[in-house]
Image (cartoon, rainbow, N blue to C red):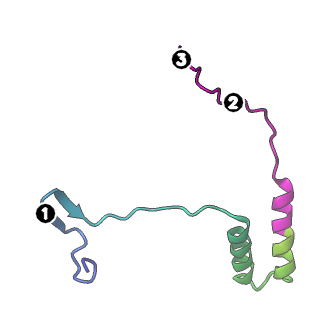
Amino acid sequence: MLKQHQIPNAVIQISGGQLQLQEDKVTSGITMKTLQESIASFFQGHPEIPNHEKLSLELLNHIKLQRTVHTSLKLKKLKVPAPDLRP
């Protein structure tokens, strides 16, 4: 409503403080699905590139193959039952 009434910088006083419109920029995560969709939309926007469907799949497969897997050891502590202190 603040944007509709062209007052995006308005401050609304309430009993606990003030309310003010604020924009937060949140970057979405890169998943293989979003990456595939992004690559496909890029190549569709460039009609001068022939065979863009095949090229986008090849690029995605290349990216998948370049990923590395790191293996490490992790100590997992076992829960020891509390000692019985009854006499």
x and y, in percent, of residue 37 in the image: 70, 75
Quadrant of the rendered structure where residue 77 is? Answer: top right
Quadrant of the rendered structure where residue 25 is? Answer: bottom left
- Residue under circle 1? 13
Q: For the residues marked 1 and 3, what is the alpha-carbon distance in whole angstroms?
A: 58 Å
Q: Amino acid at mark 1?
A: Gln
Counting residues from the start of the chain, the first of labels 2 and 3 encountered is 2
Give, as a single range, the part of the protein colored magenta: 59-87
CB under 8 Å between discs 2 and 3: no
The quarter of the picture where the N terminus appears is bottom left
Q: Amino acid at mark 3?
A: Leu
Q: Label 2's element?
A: loop
Of badges 2 and 1, the one in the foreground is: 2
Q: Residue furthest top?
A: 87
Of badges 1 and 3, the one in the foreground is: 3
Q: Residue at x 17, y 65 (%)?
A: 11
Q: Is residue 72 magenta?
A: yes
For this rendering, which residue is in front, 4 or 52?
A: 4
Q: Label 1's element?
A: strand
Left or right of 32 on screen, residue 2: left
Q: Is residue 78 magenta?
A: yes
For this rendering, which residue is in front, 56 or 31?
A: 31
- Residue under circle 3? 85
Q: Residues within 10 Å of mark 1 (few under 14, many from 20)?
A: few
- Residue under circle 2? 78
